[in-house]
Image: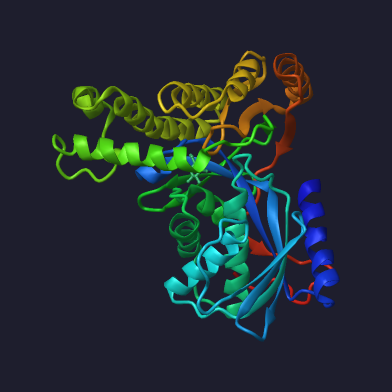
């Protein structure tokens, strides 16, 4: 377990006891993620290749007699209580995530028990590591356990996505929630965002996953994100005049795109080109990983970043400097921005033997250009959401 994970687990349990004066019934861990490939492909029904990481949201919880949730966010030192029947409208604060999950589970047909809960997270907020999906999945899993809901993993991920899209108001794809739910230690996940089929793909053990946080938080991320999504829908609408029956950019092959792209205005042409090429990069990388060819995976990551930078326009000067710096370093296979972009983190794959040198190089380059240091963490691929054993927690994990 990473130090960040262990710290968050301890904070959740101790914080719960301090606030509620008794031990929690369950302790749930839901991881954040990086996406090695497949940027902005999920809401286009495409393929993505995320990895659940060893940084997670931890939720200590116990059932309450009244139909309401009382949640302490330990990292923010804030507490919120809201009714479950009905769940009130969104407020625009952090508690929209648990409210949204309660709302979406209700829509799914779940009858939720009241809950006292303490939340601590080892996933940096706004860094592109899916801190929000981790929180959603942690709450959904806690309610699933405490209310005895018969909801499968994929359905739970979809319910959390619905919470974020329809309640919180960010029309995200399903990658982050699926990664948090289906993560597998030592593996990336090939996710087909149309069929929702998940295939774990083993990562070579000598390859390190580095996350380099530019420490620049996303500006206008939600509105720009929704705009990208709308642009893709518009491209589908225009292309469907020539390709009847297409539902998403997933349905447009590179050849068809080359033949029909002049039907799109320049901006939509660039956005669509990113998505159409993204799918083949993911499949190429999965084949390369299976053949143990990490260099080819890295090359696909590099092309992905260039495409996100030039066609999709979601990079930033900080993300570009970090990627360009590590691309040049021997032993670094590849790197790209992770998450939605507009700030946040770069994910890099590198030989374990060069990690220390790489960190030094990227820190120097970043400080020289921006006058401050990035935060670099080395991550491991981890398992998806589960109840955890911990001293001071009443219930040991059941099947699930
Ligand atoms: C955010 C969204 C995901 C996905 C990525 C971009 O993380 O929540 O659904 O679209 O951006 O790949």
Q: Is residue 179 above or below residue 59?
A: above
Relative to 397, residue 204 above or below: above
Residue at far bottom of view: 65
Q: How many marks do you count on the picture? A: 0
Instruction: Determine the image quadrant of residue 94.
Output: bottom right
**Is residue 397 placed above or below 181 in the rendered structure?**
below
Is 249 on the left or on the right of 161, as rendered? left
**Colouring scheme, one of rainbow, by chain, secondary structure, one colour:** rainbow
Seen at 47% across and 50% down, the residue is 170
- Quadrant assignment for the C terminus: bottom right
**Which residue is at a point 61% across and 65% down the rendered structure image?**
139
Please indicate whether residue 163 sits to the left or right of residue 243 in the image: right
- x%, y% of residue 183? 58, 51
Residue 201 in the image: state x and y as whole percent.
Answer: 53, 42
Foreground: 187 or 220? Answer: 220
Residue 255 coordinates in the image, percent (x, y): 24, 26
Residue 183 is at least partly visible in this image: no
> What is the x, y in percent for residue 295?
56, 22
Q: Residue at x 25, y 27 (%)?
A: 257
Q: Is residue 302 above or below residue 224?
A: above
Residue 371 figure quarter: top right
Can I make out residue 36 in this image? yes
């Amino acid at each position: 377990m990473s130090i960040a994970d262990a710290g968050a687990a301890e904070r959740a349990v101790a914080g719960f006891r301090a606030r509620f004066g008794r031990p929690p019934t369950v302790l749930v861990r839901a991881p954040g993620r990086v996406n090695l490939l497949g940027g902005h492909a999920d809401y286009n029904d495409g393929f993505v290749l995320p990895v659940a990481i060893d940084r997670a949201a931890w939720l200590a919880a116990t059932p309450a007699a009244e139909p309401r949730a009382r949640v302490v966010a330990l990292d923010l030192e804030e507490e919120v209580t809201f009714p479950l029947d009905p769940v009130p409208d969104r407020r625009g604060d952090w508690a929209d995530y648990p409210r949204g999950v309660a709302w979406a589970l209700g829509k799914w047909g779940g009858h939720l028990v009241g809950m006292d809960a303490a939340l601590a997270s080892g996933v940096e907020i706004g860094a592109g590591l899916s801190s929000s999906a981790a929180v959603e999945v942690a709450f959904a899993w806690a309610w699933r356990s405490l209310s005895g809901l018969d909801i499968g993993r994929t359905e739970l991920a979809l319910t959390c996505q619905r919470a974020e899209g329809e309640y919180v108001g960010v029309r995200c794809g399903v990658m982050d929630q699926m990664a948090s739910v289906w993560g597998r230690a030592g593996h990336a996940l090939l996710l087909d965002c149309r069929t929702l089929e998940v295939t774990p793909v083993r990562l070579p053990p000598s390859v390190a996953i580095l996350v380099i946080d530019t420490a620049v938080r996303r500006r206008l991320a939600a509105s720009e994100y929704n705009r990208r999504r709308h642009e893709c829908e518009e491209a589908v609408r225009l292309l469907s005049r020539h390709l009847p029956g297409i539902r998403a950019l997933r349905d447009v092959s590179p050849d068809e795109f080359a033949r029909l792209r002049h039907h799109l205005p320049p901006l939509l042409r660039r956005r669509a080109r990113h998505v159409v090429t993204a799918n083949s990069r993911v499949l190429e990388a999965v084949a390369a990983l299976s053949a143990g060819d990490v260099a080819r995976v890295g090359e696909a990551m590099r092309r992905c970043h260039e495409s996100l930078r030039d066609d999709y326009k979601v990079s930033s000067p900080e993300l570009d400097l970090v990627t360009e710096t590590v691309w040049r370093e021997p032993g670094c296979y590849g790197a790209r921005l992770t998450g939605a972009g507009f700030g946040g983190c770069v994910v890099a794959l590198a030989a374990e033997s060069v990690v220390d040198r790489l960190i030094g190089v990227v820190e120097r380059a970043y400080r020289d250009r921006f006058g401050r240091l990035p935060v670099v963490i080395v991550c491991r691929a981890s398992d998806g959401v589960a109840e955890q054993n911990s001293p001071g927690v009443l219930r040991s994990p059941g099947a699930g």
